[in-house]
Amino acid sequence: MSIVDEKSWRILAALQKDARASLKALAETAGLSVPATAERIRKMEEAGIIRGYHAEVAPEALGYIITAVVAITTQHPYKQKFIEVLRAKPQVLECLHVTGADSCLFTVVAKNMQDLEQFLSSINKYGETRTSIVMSSQIPRRGVQQF
């Protein structure tokens, strides 16, 4: 058996929708026994397929009404220091190292435009930035699906 067959995909889909789903519910979804389901989950965790279990938090419900996507072009000598600076900033939700003209793309939240402006000013010395304010999410982040 491959680690990820059709039954395992069903388990993954269910866990990505509800990481708190019970083993019993997951077993029913996959058409397996509870012990067999638990074993598949354990194997997928060990293989690094399942990295963790998370709550999805709404930033706007916590007062972070602005979400922005920032692209930065930074020179190689400053890149590692820049990444360290971003890691220390709690408003940075994600940072991606990308190909093309930009060095990184990252998502940041802010309580208001002044907050965002202060954040951007704090990273200006590392390179040229381009910021896009998120108006709405057309396809919210979703789990990995079989295709």
Image (cartoon, grey):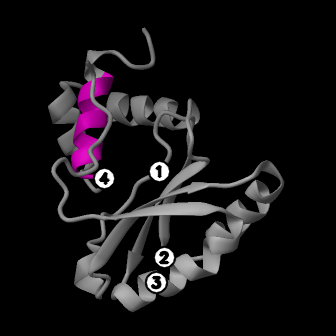
Of the two numbered discs 3 and 2 on the same chain, state the one appearing first in sequence: 2
- Please name which of the two marks, 1 or 3, marks the residue nearer to the observer: 3
Q: CA distance from mark 1 to mark 3?
A: 33 Å
| Circle nearer the viewer, 4 or 3 | 3
State the separation of the CA atoms marked 2 and 1. 21 Å
- Expressed as whole percent of the image width and height from the top left, the position of residue 54 reads 38, 59
Q: Residue furthest right?
A: 77
Residue 91 is labelled as: 2
- Name which residue lies at 74% across and 55% down: 79
Main SS of the magenta part reads: helix
Residue 118: give x, y in percent of width and height. 52, 87
Q: Which sits earlier in the primary sequence, circle 1 or circle 3?
A: 1
**Which residue lies under the disc numbered 1?**
52
The residue at which mark 4 appears reads as 19
Q: Which mark is residue 60?
A: none
First in sequence: mark 2 vs mark 4:
4
Query: 39 or 66: which is nearer to us?
Result: 66
| Amino acid type shown at disc 2 | Gln
| 109 is within the stretch colored magenta | no
Type of the residue with mark 1: Gly
The residue lying toward the viewer, choosing from 124 and 141, is 124
Is 110 or 55 nearer to us in this picture? 110
Magenta-highlighted residues = 8-19
Query: Of tags 2 and 1, which is closer to the observer?
Result: 2
